[in-house]
Image (spheres, rainbow, N blue to C red):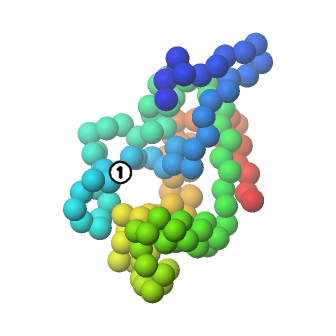
Amino acid sequence: MNSKSIKKTNFLIIGEASTTYFYDRVPYWYNKSNEIEFDDSLPPLPELVTNELPDIKIIISLRDPVDRAISAYYHWMKTGITSPRLGLKKVAKEYPKMRILEYGYYEEYLKIWQKYVPQERILILIF
């Protein structure tokens, strides 16, 4: 995301919505293992966003973490990357690269955003 891709009006800034912007680091998906690999030389996403948009106000919409994990598991099954025969528990533990459990650790990621964006500019909604 960069400031050129954001539409500015007199009253608000309209940007993008993504389920992965909340998470602090972008994983390197194209590795051969089932593990998640990160390039720690890159700054965390909240830092990148606030460098471009220092006065940003954000809305974070969170889903029940169990429902979110089940939905992610179904997603990976529909894409054919995992088999329904393995079961959610096995896939979540043995294939961390899919981030089925990690994406539900909301508190961990929220703390990182709060280092860069003051609490009064963060609205958290739970559905």
Q: Nearer the viewer, residue 107 or 58?
A: 58
User: Is residue 75 shown above or below 26?
Assistant: below
Would you place residue 48 above or below residue 104 in this image? above
Label 1 amino acid?
Pro
Q: Residue at x 45, y 47 (%)?
A: 24
Tag 1's secondary structure?
Answer: strand
View extreme (top): residue: 10
Identify the residue under disc 1: 27
Question: Quadrant where the C terminus lies?
Answer: bottom right
Seen at 51% across and 52% down, the residue is 109
Residue at image position (59%, 68%) is 71
Q: Nearer the viewer, residue 110 or 15?
A: 15
Which residue is the extreme one toward the left? 32
Residue 118 shows in the view? no
Residue 77 placement (x, y as % from top left): 49, 72
Q: How many marks?
A: 1
* Residue 113, percent from left and from top: 53, 43
Looking at the picture, how far across and down is residue 125, in whole percent?
73, 51
Q: Is residue 12 above or below residue 44?
A: above
Q: Between residue 10 and residue 7, name the one nearer to us.
A: 7
Identify the image quadrant of residue 36. bottom left
Q: Residues within 10 Å of mark 1 (few under 14, many from 20)?
A: some
User: Where residue 57 appears, x then y in whole percent?
Assistant: 66, 32
Q: What residue is drawn where x is 72% and y is 15%?
A: 9
